[in-house]
Image: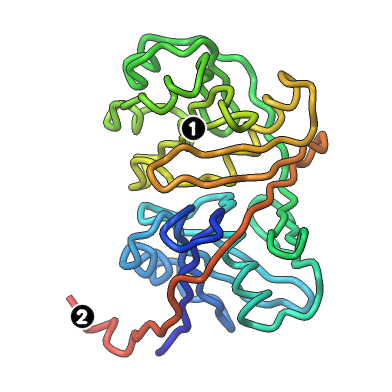
Amino acid sequence: MKLDIFQVDAFSAEVFGGNPAAVLPLYEWLSDELMQRIALENNLPETAFFVQRGEYYELRWFTPGGEIDLCGHATLAAAHVLFDYLEYPDECIVFATRSGRLFVDREDGCRLSMDFPAWPAKPFQVTERVQRALGIRPDELYFSRDFMAVYKDEATVRALRPDMELVSRLDGLCLIVTAPGEEYDFVSRVFVPSLGIPEDPVTGSAHCTLVPYWAKRLGKSDLRAYQASERGGELFCRDLGDRVKIAGSAVLYLRGTIHLEHAASCG
């Protein structure tokens, strides 16, 4: 069996920036075990698989450590592949996912805009366990699907060196840290060691929680965000109440073929 594979740097207009994702267009679903093995072999934060079903696409995301319920950068990457390399004819792509229907359309010619669910977070007590995991006590702590720790300034967020072993034991999927930005409305970093991703370069799904918080705090619906990882990535966000818009650029790094002829016999 041979499969087409694309590797896309999402939330970046240049290669080597943003967050890399592998994208595999399929005619029919592979087994969960095989998709997981492919994701592990790719060793990227996420590998996206999609199958066309009439006018929409079923979309799933796998990290090296398991399948997840929502991934922003790999959705952006999948849409980029469809629009730019698979001749998708319309202006809006509909993805059916574990998190409901997601919509991606072109924005200003060079950016893609994703319509995602909003995940407002509730205040959470800063426990000793969380403080030890972070290393620096946050000013505020919230919980949605993920933990979100809020700090006073960008410098503190950039200086954090969390204990990954302790972070992996926390509830929730991701640990988000955030603060007001110096050049952006807010900055963030995201850690997911439980899924084999110590620090995720740019995390679209984290902004389902970040955007409602910062929109309320700053009193504005349109927000410019930056994820301050080593690779870094720029996001253009809009709070829509029960939905959020998350937009960014994407660029192709690699296009090739996966060869699985000997997959069953390889040890």
Badge 2: residue crowd in 10 Å (few <14, some 14–19, many ≥20):
few
Residue picked out by circle 2:
266
Query: Which residue is more in the foreground, 43 or 97?
Result: 43
- The residue type indicated by label 1 comes to Gly
State the quadrant of the C terminus: bottom left
In the rendered image, the vertical position of residue 11 relative to residue 173, given as above or below: below
Instruction: Name which residue lies at 71% across and 47% down.
Output: 116
**x and y percentages locating residue 152 in the rendered image:** 52, 14
Query: Which residue is more in the foreground, 233 or 93?
Result: 233
Question: Which colour style is shown?
Answer: rainbow
Residue picked out by circle 1:
172
**x and y percentages locating residue 168 in the rendered image:** 34, 33
- The residue type indicated by label 2 comes to Cys
**x and y percentages locating residue 247 in the rendered image:** 68, 51
SS of the residue at dot 1? Answer: loop
| Rendered image quadrant of residue 98 | bottom right
Nearest to N terminus: mark 1 or mark 2: 1
Instruction: Name which residue lies at 38% across and 59% down.
Output: 44
